[in-house]
Amino acid sequence: MDNDNSRLAHRRRDDDRPKDQFLKLRNWLNIIFMVGAIIGVSIYLLSNHQVGIIIVLVAMVFKIVESALRFLH
């Protein structure tokens, strides 16, 4: 019986949390960052160091935007 009550209380707390309106956008920005970072590091290690650094820095811009959205929420 106590287990059922704790489940109901937990469900109520989840419903009270505000919805994150930027969640989908933040997920996409994270995906772009991860793909860009992997490509940038790969190019840095396998080919041209300068191009790899530029790609990683551009990917970091997406991560900074995502972080700003998370903090502003």
Image (tube, rainbow, N blue to C red):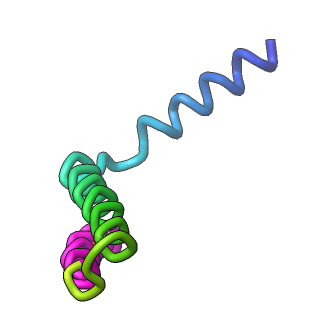
Q: In this rendering, is residue 4 above or below 26?
A: above
x then y, percent, for residue 68? 27, 76
Closest to the observer, 31 or 16 = 31
Q: In this rendering, is residue 13 above or below 63?
A: above
Q: Is residue 64 visible in this depiction of the protein?
A: yes
Q: Which residue appears farthest toward the top when viewing the image?
A: 1
The structure residue drawn at horizontal position 22% and vertical position 51%, both measured from the top left corner, is: 28
The span shown in magenta is: 52-71
In screen coordinates, is 41 left or right of 56? right
Q: Which residue appears farthest toward the right when viewing the image?
A: 2
x then y, percent, for residue 22? 21, 54
x then y, percent, for residue 11? 53, 29
Quarter of the figure that contains the C terminus: bottom left
Q: Is residue 69 visible in this depiction of the protein?
A: no
Q: Main secondary structure of the magenta part?
A: helix
Q: Which residue appears farthest toward the bottom when viewing the image?
A: 50
